[in-house]
Amino acid sequence: IGVQELINHSHRAKFGCRLCPIESVSELSPEGAGLGNYFTGNRDTLDQLRDKIQFENGAPELSIKFKTKFAELESFYGPLFFGLDEMHCIGSNVAKRIWQMISSVFNNSNTPFELDSTARQVIGKSVAESSGLIPSGVFEGTFRDYHTKLRNMRAVDWISFLLYVVPTLVCDMLEIKLGLDQSNEVVDALVALVTGCSLALSWEITDDDIVNMKSAFEEWHQYMYDHVETNMYSLNMHLLRHIPEVTENLGPIRGISARSMERIIGYFKKRIRSTNNSAKHVGNILRRHQASKFYNLLKSPIEEQPRIKYAIEQNENDTLHNSDDMELWNHFSTTVDNYRDVNLRFYLVQYWRRQYPNDTIGPSDIDNNIIVGKRLYQKKTDAVYDASKTGRKTKKIRNFVAMDINVDINKRRPRTREQWEIQRFFSEAILFFAHKYNGKEVILCFANFYHNVKLNAGGCPCGTSRIGSSPLSKRYLIEASAIQTQAGILKMPMINRDNNSTTFRYYYIYSNMIPNSIIPGEVTLL
């Protein structure tokens, strides 16, 4: 049952927002098939929330036909009581509408975001061909060819499109089409939308995040108000402006989402085939499902946990590293000399010299014993990483990671005071292992770091390096605790019209990616 039915209200009414009494505008629909109600509102201000009494007594003049039974609850406190679902608002509606604007599918509306069929074909094909470069355990939606395979797109698929494809491929295509100067305003508007939605869909949200979210949604609203036709401003576009206050009152909207419920509905829907005695059939399916889950819990309480794992307990006085956050799974003992092919001893010397700059450390001072993990488990993100030296053979990459490292940006300037900042690096993990020096043991990541990473027009990291072929990369040894998340890659062909040659641009995407929120790592500072 939808919230509208529960509160005796309709989103098609004159005052169609259940959160505030904004008055809709009647316009010919984008399809040119009849009139619809649209919610542009005021350019610079947002209507106050509805009064609690409207739900307690009904307010026909404001499109609440009569009172709702929920208002009789002692816990009822007003319009925010009913929450806001991110899947339906952002996924099935706003994100989908953005692609419709890009595709120019409407007969009665034009938008600044339109791309021609060739550009859309490049976007769709690029995303589909990049699917093997995107780890499925990190990104929830399916990455597919949006140009030719829109059928059965789910809300989570549309959300992935909005968060990862719009600020990368779409924004760069708009820049190519409109030119650098003319595209700035259009791209900035889309980036504002993506920023607001990325913040809104985070699991952890600070007070500053709410301020930035509100600012981003207001920037998007004002651009829509000034440059996009009224009949594009659906109710869900308006509801974006309410997300910050919903978050302030109820917490992250992911926590009140129907996402898990939608998944289980889909799961059971596929299995219910009986038409004669469907109730009994549903009961049998539910019992069988619960019995199966119970059996699996008894058999394997933690499905992916290995039989052997290695962790380092951190002492109270040891603030060198957060190795206690890491575990080496399926580990084995070996020696540094067994990795002469990657010159591991050389990199260990460099690493420990950085940790103990006053010590004279040479190759002979390096303990030859190491403990290697076939996989690395990170507790804070509940993520499992592979390394190219020991990783499993999978269809999707699992060793491409994003790291945050504190670097001195004045490193290459002699006699200049140190100035430290955290930069985001992208690298292919080669080996995870534990090593000890001077009584200190730490879990390390030996990796290939990508060079020349920049921010694109949409404020997202991109470069020319790709998995397995990075001539401009740099090998470096760093604490495994620097890893922030697994990352994926979207690749798009870039055609040089002067000589008709084709190169590729690679976008490095990661979960909770917020445009313009990182400083791309400069490998020469490592």
Image (spheres, grey):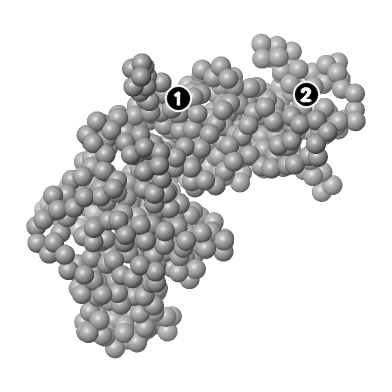
The residue positioned 43% from the left and 53% from the top of the image is 192
| Residue 143, picture quadrant | top left
The residue at the far top in this view is 341
Specify the label residue 350 is tagged with.
2
| Residue 295, picture quadrant | top left
Above-or-below relation of 82 to 326? below
Above-or-below relation of 416 to 255? above
Q: Residues within 10 Å of mark 1 (few under 14, many from 20)?
A: few
Above-or-below relation of 212 to 102? below
Tell me residue 369's x, y (percent): 77, 21
| Residue 371, picture quadrant | top right
The residue at the far left in this view is 33
The nearer-to-camera label among 2 and 1 is 2
Tell me residue 48's x, y (percent): 39, 77
List the residue tagged with mark 1.
394
Residue closer to the observer: 270 or 164:
164
The residue positioned 71% from the left and 22% from the top of the image is 333
Query: The N terminus is located in which quarter?
Result: bottom left
**Residue 102 visible in the displayed image:** yes
Local SS, label 1:
loop
